[in-house]
Image (cartoon, helix red, strand yellow):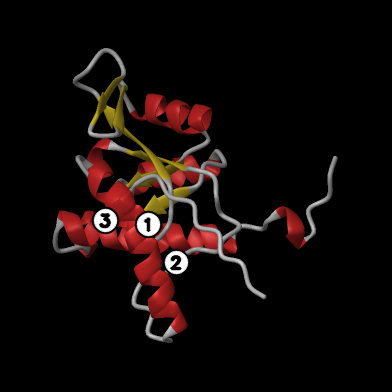
Amino acid sequence: MYQLVITFSSIEELKRRLRELLEQLEGRSTIQTVPACVQQKIKVLCDESVRKLGSLLTRLAADRGIQLEVYEVDSSIDREVEIDGVTHVPVKDDLDVLRVASRLKAILVTGDKKLAETAKAYGIQVIYIPPSGVISKEDYALKTIEKLTELIQTKPTPSQGQENR
């Protein structure tokens, strides 16, 4: 006997999940999904070199069963604002970007090589894709989701040997 439990927040999401399940059962899955162990929202912070990427990332991630909490930094605002599900955070410079990423424990998405290297040196997870390596904003978002999926799938889970402290 088998039991199937599907959690969903809308009818559209249920339909999408059922389509994915049928594709997988038929052996013709076209969508790369993440392991079921990844249930929490993943925080992503986009710097100003990848402006207006947040809503695209949210949609693409949802198609793959990834729940994102997306933040975008913005040096032209003076208070935090949410627009279309993306939280815009005020910053003055790269130091603020690093502070926000660290405070949120977010994965930093950037096209700025120096910022990426500095963030890595401070222990912040980074997805760096040079802007010259993509052909459009949509391509940048697709490549970012691919790298994000790889990061998630390589993260150790508690069942993979992490000890309780």
Res 111 seen here:
no
Kind of residue sitting beneath label 2: Thr
* Amino acid found under the numbered disc labelled 1: Leu
Measured as percent of width and height from the top left, residue 134 is found at: 20, 63
Q: Determine whether 82 is above or below 120 in the image.
A: above
141 on left or right of 115: left
Residue annotated with mark 1 = 14
Q: Secondary structure at mark 3?
A: helix
Image coordinates of residue 122 in percent, x first then y, are 55, 38
How packed mark 1 is, by other alpha carbons closer than 10 Å (few <14, some 14-19, many 20 or more), is some
- Is 84 rendered above or below residue 107? above
Residue drawn 40% across the image and 52% down it: 127
Mark 1 or mark 2, whichever is nearer to me: 1
Mark 3 touching mark 2, by CB under 8 A? Answer: no
Q: Mark 1 or mark 3, which is nearer to you?
A: 1
Q: Quadrant of residue 43?
A: top left
Distance of label 1 from label 2 (alpha carbons)? 15 Å
Q: Which residue is mark 2?
A: 33
Task: In this rendered view, identify the residue nearer to me: 165 or 129.
Answer: 165
Q: Is 43 displayed left or right of 1 in the figure?
A: left
Q: Which residue is mark 3?
A: 141
Image x and y of residue 141, in percent: 26, 56
Of callouts 3 and 2, the N-terminal one: 2
Left or right: residue 117 compared with residue 135? right
Q: Are marks 1 and 2 in contact (CB under 8 Å)?
A: no
Q: Does 66 sit above or below residue 105?
A: below
